[in-house]
């Protein structure tokens, strides 16, 4: 039986699937892990764990289906991450993770001053924020010069796995476009002047597209993983984009909502059909997973991480909390929460934002708090959607994916708050499934498989019209609550760092209110 193997390295776990030619999952496996948070605003992970977990997952999947013939391998991972390695491909430090790591504020400000906002946006597509990879590389050069002198290569989870599996040193265009400002969005290539200025000692990885074959499994990698030597391996990309592939949400006009530890949104546009590359200072403009596509993307720094925090804090299980949140009802009995417990990415781009719970009384329960948390993430999604639309995004279709889609209440709240119909596919396992699909397409001899055949829509979630006015009012309060508490929470964030830090690279709240209106 011909099968493809897909593995995704996520924030809280690594997941693998073995999928047959019709898209049926024959076996799946997971390895849980934790990221390191050595100081407020810093989120890291030992990159060597990515390979160790891939190898363990591959062996488990191979053993689970001994009759399977693995014909290709797909890889995916969280990002953009910055894993620097020496000339022997040994990591010189733990990987610095994506926008949840906010350490490079000073570098963002300095590079923006040196290069100018106009040139940064013209060349790279986006302003520099905590999501950008370039400032994090510069942070290493500034703060850890002895580490920087040993660094020679740049990896992200997917490209690290490709290197270990095949020996190829590549990075996909989508991931590269998030190493801002070192990538040219329109020319789809590294921007050599900026690269040489800020990362001259790092060898530039070759650029390919996510579904391209990067190489084949070496004999050494085969011995460690059980995957036959010579098996093709695709380049892969960042998990949110592979998730979009897994549910077919990568056509022009599609918006993918990824429910996970964080929340991620990807809107797809195509410059091949004459559309413009959309740009707005409060979102991320990136290359797409496929040639000729562009994305306007955004992400909340917490979603599942926030509900998990409440679960641990209250010592309750998810079924209990969901039942109590459902009983609490729309509006959480007068509670309003800002979900910025790890700073916030889009659209406020504020690493010093913090969580706020407004309206608390002695009568409120943990169910009210949990309901307010679910509504907070939904309000965050609406803030992103309205900002995308203000930038020109013609959102025609919404597709939900990720572990959070297993809870109907959360899906319903997001639809009620945003006013959007969400399509939920039959398989929501996510990026590992999308990686397996890309791997199947890459080696198709004749007609390539279609994701609509592999993974059809299973249900739709429709907003309840009677709640529209209530959530419109709550959204207005949500935007104003950030503006009203911003200065105080910035002072608290400075206290948490132990000393006054530099001003946040955030956007003025009056601009946000205008965008949201």
Image (cartoon, rainbow, N blue to C red):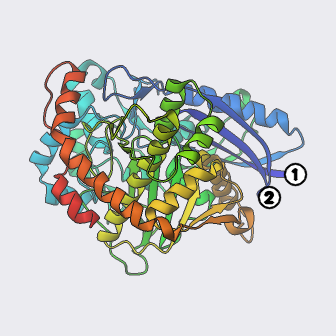
Question: Residue 316, percent across and down?
Answer: 59, 28
Query: Tag 1 or tag 2, which sits nearer the N-term?
Result: 1
Q: Would residue 262 appear left or right of 514 to someone viewing this image? A: right
Q: Is residue 40 visible?
A: yes
Q: Which quadrant of the structure image shows residue 38? A: top left
Category of crowding for the residue at label 2, using alpha-carbon neighbours closer than 10 angstroms: few (below 14), some (14–19), many (at least 20): some
Q: Would residue 226 appear left or right of 512 to someone viewing this image? A: right
Q: Residue lying furthest bottom in this view?
A: 274
Q: Which residue is mark 1?
A: 1
* Whether label 2 touches label 1, CB < 8 Å: yes
What secondary structure is marked by label 2? loop
What secondary structure is marked by label 1? loop
**Which residue does the image show at 37% across and 78% down from the upper left?**
275
Q: Residue lying furthest left in this view?
A: 113
The residue closer to the viewer here, 424 or 286, is 424
* Mark 2 → mark 1, Cα distance in angstroms: 8 Å
Q: Quadrant of the C terminus?
A: bottom left
Q: Would residue 330 appear left or right of 43 to someone viewing this image? A: right
Q: Which residue is mark 2?
A: 21
Count of residue discs: 2
Question: Residue 120, percent across and down?
Answer: 20, 55
Q: Is residue 34 visible?
A: no
**Which residue does the image show at 44% across and 46% down from the upper left?**
333
């Amino acid at each position: 039986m011909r099968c493809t193997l897909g593995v995704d390295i996520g924030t809280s776990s690594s997941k693998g699937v073995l999928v047959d030619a019709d898209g049926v999952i024959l076996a799946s496996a997971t390895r849980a892990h934790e990221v390191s948070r050595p100081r407020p605003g810093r989120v890291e992970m030992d990159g060597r764990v990515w390979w160790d977990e891939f190898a363990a997952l591959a062996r488990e999947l191979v053993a689970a289906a001994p009759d399977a013939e693995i014909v290709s391998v797909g890889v995916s991972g969280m990002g953009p991450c910055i894993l620097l390695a020496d000339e022997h491909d040994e990591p010189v430090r733990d990987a610095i993770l994506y926008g949840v790591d906010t350490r490079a504020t000073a570098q963002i400000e300095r590079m923006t001053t040196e290069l100018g906002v106009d040139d940064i946006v013209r060349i790279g597509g986006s302003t520099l924020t905590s999501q950008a990879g370039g400032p994090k590389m510069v942070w290493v050069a500034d703060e850890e010069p002895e580490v920087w002198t040993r660094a020679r290569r740049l990896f992200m989870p997917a490209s690290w796995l490709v290197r270990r599996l095949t020996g190829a040193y590549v990075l996909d265009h989508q991931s590269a476009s998030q190493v801002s400002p070192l990538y040219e969005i329109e020319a789809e290539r590294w921007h050599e002047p900026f690269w040489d200025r800020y990362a001259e000692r790092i060898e530039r990885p070759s650029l390919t597209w996510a579904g391209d074959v990067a190489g084949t499994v070496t004999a050494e990698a085969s011995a460690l993983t059980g995957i036959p030597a010579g098996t093709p391996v695709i380049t892969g990309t960042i998990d949110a984009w592979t998730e979009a592939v897994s549910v077919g949400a990568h056509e022009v006009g599609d918006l993918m909502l990824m429910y996970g530890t964080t929340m991620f949104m990807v809107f797809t546009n195509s410059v091949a059909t004459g559309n413009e590359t959309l740009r707005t200072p409060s979102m991320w403009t990136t290359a797409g997973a496929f040639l000729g596509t562009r994305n306007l993307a955004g992400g909340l720094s917490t979603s599942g991480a926030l509900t998990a925090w409440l679960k641990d804090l209250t010592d309750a299980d998810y079924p209990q909390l969901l039942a109590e949140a459902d009983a609490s009802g729309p509006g959480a009995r007068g509670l309003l929460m800002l979900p910025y417990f790890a700073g916030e990415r889009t659209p406020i781009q504020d690493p010093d934002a913090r969580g706020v719970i407004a309206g608390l009384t002695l009568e409120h329960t943990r169910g009210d708090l949990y309901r307010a948390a679910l509504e907070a993430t939904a309000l965050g999604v609406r803030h992103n959607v309205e900002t995308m639309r203000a930038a020109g995004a013609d959102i025609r279709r919404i597709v939900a994916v990720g572990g959070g889609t297993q809870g109907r209440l959360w899906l319903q709240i997001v639809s009620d708050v945003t006013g959007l119909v969400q399509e939920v596919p039959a398989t929501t396992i996510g990026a590992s499934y999308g990686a397996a699909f890309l791997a199947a397409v890459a080696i198709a001899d004749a007609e390539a498989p279609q994701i609509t055949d592999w993974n059809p829509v299973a249900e739709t979630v429709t907003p309840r019209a009677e709640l529209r006015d209530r959530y419109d009012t709550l959204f207005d309060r949500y935007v104003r609550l950030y503006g009203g508490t911003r200065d105080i929470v910035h002072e608290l964030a400075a206290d948490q760092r132990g000393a006054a830090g530099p001003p946040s690279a955030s956007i003025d709240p009056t601009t946000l209110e205008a965008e949201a209106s």
